[in-house]
Structure formats: C-alpha cells, structure tokens
Image: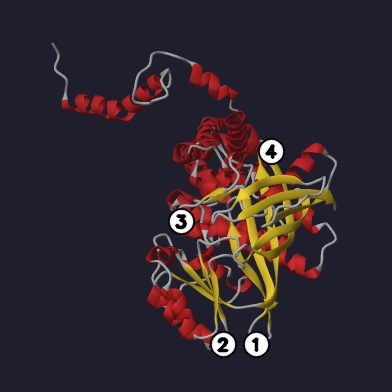
Amino acid sequence: MKKLSFSNVMLWVGLAFIYLPMLIMVIYSFNASKLVTVWGGWSIKWYAGLLDNSQLMGSVGRSLEIALYTAVAAVALGTLAAFVLTRVTRFKGRTLFGGLVTAPLVMPEVITGLSLLLLFVAMAQLIGWPQERGIVTIWIAHTTFCSAYVAVVVSARLRELDLSIEEAAMDLGAKPWKVFFLITIPMIAPSLAAGGMMSFALSLDDLVLASFVSGPGSTTLPMEVFSAVRLGVNSDEDLLGGFVEHAFIAGKAIVHPLPRGGVAPEGWNPLFAEKVRDVVLNGVSVFSLADAHRAGARMLAEGPVRAKLAEACGGLGQYVAHDLDELDAWLGGLEERQLAQGLVLEANLESIVTHSVGQLRVNGFLLSYHGHQHQTRNARGELVYAGSDLLVARGGYAELLALDLAREVRQAIEYARIFDTAAAIFFPGCFASRRNYDIAQGRDGNGRERFGVLEQSWRVGGASSAEIAALEAFRADPGLPAVRAASFEIHEDKRLPDNSRVIYRGPDEHGDFLLKYAMTGEA
C-alpha cells in the first residue's frame, strides 16, 4: 500500500478545513426541524419558503442586476487601464495612475465605502445628485472596487502577448482601434472572461461597500442575510421603527457633543456632533453627575438651561434651571441609571415652535412630511406632548419640497436632511424605517432667535398614528399627491369627530386617563 506523503496529507486536511463546514451547512439546509442543531429529517420546505419570500427574492434579483452591471463596467474600465499601463510606458503621472488603479486592492473596504459615501453626500449637496442612494451608487462603488482586479488580470495577459501579430496588422494598414478590437481583444478574451466572472462574484457577495452606499429600498442579498442573522428581520422595510447598535443612540444624547474631558459611553462618535453642530441648538450631553454640574455652571452664565433626560419622551423628564443651585437640586433627584443613559443640557427657549420633519417607509411605500407639535396639561398639571399636525407628501423630500411651504418650514426640512445624512455616515450599523426629527424655533434668554434640531426619533412616536393614517389615505387613493393628517393625545374623554380613528383609550403609564386618536383631511 502506497503511503501518503506529508504534502498530500496537508492538502486533504486543508481542503477538509475549508469545504467540510460548507458541506455540513448544505446538508442541514434540508433539515425539517426549526432548530439548526437538531436533525429532524429531510425536507425541502425551507427552500419552498425561500422562494415565497418576495423580499429576499427581490434582493436576489437586485444583487444579480448590480453584479451584471458591475462585471460589464469593470471589464471595460479595467481593460482600458491595463492597456494604458502596459502599452503606454511613458507619460507624466504614470506612477500616480498606476497607484490609483491598484489602490482598491489594498485599501480597506470600510475606508473605500466611507469615502464614496462622503463623495455622494457632497455631490447631492452641490449638484442635487444622487437624491437617494440606491442601485446606481452601489454599482459605482462595486465598479470602482472590481476594476482594480480586472486591471491586474488583464495586465498580466497583455504582457505575455506576442506583439508581432499586432505589428503585422498595422503594417498592412489597419488602424490602431481596429487592431485593438479585432486582434488584441480576441487574444486576451480568456482574461476578460476571468475578470468578468471575478467582478460578478465580488459584487454578488459584497456587504461592506453596499452597506455604506445603499439607501432604503436598495438592499442587496448579503445585506438581507446579515440583517436576518443579526436581528431576525430582513431590512428596515420589515419593521416600523429602527435598530441602533448602542442604547444612547436612540435618545437625545447624540444631538450634542460631550463637554471637554467628559465621560463617554461605549460607541460614542465625537465626529457626529461636529458634523451637525450648525443645525442643532447650543448644548452638551453628559453621562455623569460631575460633568452635568461643570457644564451646567458654564451654560448658566449665558441664561436659563433646560435639562432633559436622554431617555425621556412626550415632553416629560425636563427641567428649566435658572441658577446652579436649582440645577444641582434637580440632578440630586435623579437615579444613577438615568444619568448613565445620558442627560442633555440646552439653552432654554421661549415662545418655542416645534417643527416635525420625517419620513416613513413601509414595504416599499415612502412618504415624507412636516408639521407642528402642540402641547397640553396632563392630570398632574405637567406640560406634555398633545399631538402633531402634519402635511404629508407621497414620495421623498423632493416631493415634499415641491409643495407650497413657508421659509422656516423649508429650513426645518433642510436641517433634518443634514442631520439624517450625518447619522447615516457616522452610525452605519443603524437603520430605521421611521425617521422623525424635531426642530425647535424660539428665542433664548438674550432674545436671540434660535433654530435647530432638538432630537431624533427612530422608533414609533407620538406622530406615528398620523403617519399611518396618511399611509392608509395614500393606499386608498393612488392618485393622491398629499394629505393632511393629525394625531391627538388628550387627558379627557369626549365625543370625537366622525372622521377620526381612535388609537387608544385608557390609562397612561401613570394611571391617568389618556385618549389617542388620528384623522386626515385635504391638503
């Protein structure tokens, strides 16, 4: 019996290490049990369910489409780049050109994705394109990445070619372009095919680049699978609300920077606050009692300060302090847990008007809106949220801005868009199908006009009932371009208008009576 050599043993061990897990995964894909670790017999029901999943199959088609476009574009651009590098040996900037062509090979995908995202954001601000990131932006990113691989493959083949055939053709009077298409291209066809297949595969299984440059409604297959494994949902279109990687991101704390030397929670990104500095109110976020005291003392020198718990909602969890003793007394009543989740200190505004700007995307349907919030007193006399009046447009912000809007409303929409774009850049692991932003307009203690984002809401909020009512109106009338919708929260029971829809009638979290309802009307 012939003994196996060491090299053969290592070869088979290496192949088993790579391919045995794949084989086991394929076998268990036919498992009838819902539990991955328990074998319940052979079945193809999960494959049948996969084919019935329209969301997933849509992402498959989208990924194949992008991969096909990428393969064609990458082969074309990579071949031209390779031809220049191999046949045009001397020209100014050749070294720089070669470095730029091969840079995506060695550059981390995170850096490439972030750079392209910043490019698209800057282009949208300068020339208005792209308004929405989708298939085109993913295609551009994948083409940029894959062209480098094609250039390397084709360059290697071009260096091996016998130039005598091309020279003979040119001696017989053939033009350079004719020689290239009729002689060179057929001779390097195998490398073109290899480059095309490699580009197709790289585009098909890319997750990182697509996550940076995609937008809602343009989810690729790897993104779908990753989201399903991580969250149990396929995309932001499968839930009403959002997902954040760290708890503080869901609250008010991300709006403002930390004080110098302040305690930062895990996952804090200081660049975000710097990016949105011009569209938010003057304030700081703190996560410790010492930071709150120190920052409050500095801010109180300029006027009254509004302190808000980052986790609070509905207008609760707030206090206006006029001096440091008042602030310290209020801080002393807080739990350590509340401080650990974040506290916002802002300049207090008088005669305040709160604009609501947001978008809702559910199952491929998109609506955008602006409106105003109103307040009321609850049973304990506290000033709380009482609902929102919204003007809702079918489509994105472009459709909303096409309506007849006041100057301050357009400014609020622009501030919300800047905030939303920055969040997509600096919190790429988060997503939301419902994105709402509160923008405050009022006067500070010195009588100066202030305008800025108060907070974001990437969850079901007070205005969600009005948003759902508008969604139902749009679905009932496909030709309806815009609609007015309103949500109400009152603390007394009364007879409601006939066109209203009761959302909730019963006790609130404190046991007091609460009535929530919504209604729609003509825009």
Marks 2/3: CA distance? 31 Å
Label 2 neighbour load within 10 Å: few <14, some 14-19, many 20+ = few
**Is 67 situated above or below 330?**
above
Report the residue at 61% width, 38% height from top: 66
Judging depth in this view, the residue of 133 and 286 nearest the camera is 286
Considering the numbered disc 2 on the image, is that residue within a helix, a strand or a loop? loop
- Is tag 4's residue or tag 2's residue first in the polypeptide sequence? 4
Answer whether residue 98 is visible to the viewer in this image.
Answer: no
**Is 450 situated above or below 236?**
below
- Is tag 3's residue or tag 1's residue first in the polypeptide sequence? 3
Marks 4 and 3 close (CB-CB < 8 Å): no
Marks 1/2: CA distance? 8 Å
Report the residue at 61% width, 59% height from top: 420
Marks 1/4: CA distance? 83 Å
- Is tag 1's residue or tag 4's residue first in the polypeptide sequence? 4
Q: Quadrant of residue 411?
A: bottom right
Q: Which mark is residue 446?
A: 1
Residue identified by numbered label 4? 173
- Total labels: the figure holds 4
Q: Quadrant of the N terminus?
A: top left
Residue identified by numbered label 2? 302
| Rendered location of residue 133, percent (x, y) | 64, 49
Residue identified by numbered label 3? 247
Query: Label 1 amino acid?
Result: Asn
